[in-house]
Amino acid sequence: MKTLIALIFSLSLSLNAQEKSSTTYTKKGALTQVVAYHTNGTIAQKGALKNNKLHGEWISYDEEGRKLTMGNYDNGVKTGKWLFWKENQLLEVDYKDNKPNQTVQWTKASLASIDE
């Protein structure tokens, strides 16, 4: 009986987690605001669509809420400066015509030497 109760409890937690993994769409003028969630309920991505294309600032997060990526789209095309975080590194990529044009890699050590 205890095993059955544990199984039902585990299944209900799993179903609740699956329910939290979703995406919301909110129309605001010409844009549709998009928020996608991880299974634990934290935000995975947020940004906007214009004419069903990625448009404006988009940010993605890991399951703990730390930023992973931040950049801009112009009608589905990556444009300008994008930032990518990974552990102790920050990668700064400038996009032109949807392709990486210039890349700079920052580490905590390089940032510390700039401050000195």
Image (cartoon, helix red, strand yellow):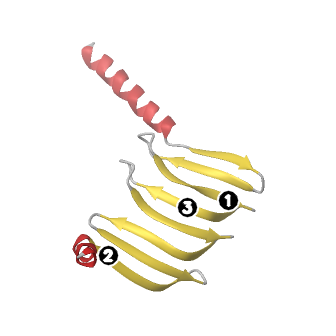
Compared to 15, does 108 lie above or below?
A: below
Reading the image, the residue beneath label 2 is 106
On the image, the x and y values in percent for residue 22 come to 54, 43
Q: On the image, which quarter does residue 26 sit in?
A: top right
Gap in angstroms between the C-alphas marked 3 and 1: 10 Å
3 vs 2, front mark:
2
On the image, the x and y values in percent for residue 11 come to 39, 28
Residue at the far bottom in the pictured view = 101
Q: Residues within 10 Å of mark 3 (few under 14, many from 20)?
A: some
Gap in angstroms between the C-alphas marked 2 and 1: 30 Å
Reading the image, the residue beneath label 3 is 58
Which residue is rendered at x = 47% and y = 38% of the image?
18
Which residue is rendered at x = 21% and y = 74% of the image?
109
Compared to 84, does 94 lie above or below?
A: below
- Residue type for callout 2: Trp
Q: Which of pointers 3 and 1 lies earlier in the amino acid sequence?
A: 1
On the image, the x and y values in percent for residue 97 come to 61, 84
Residue at the far top in the pictured view = 1
2 vs 1, front mark:
2
Reading the image, the residue beneath label 1 is 49
Q: Is residue 11 left or right of residue 98?
A: left
Which residue is rendered at x = 58% and y = 63% of the image?
57
Q: Is residue 78 left or right of residue 31?
A: left
Q: Which of pointers 3 and 2 lies earlier in the amino acid sequence?
A: 3
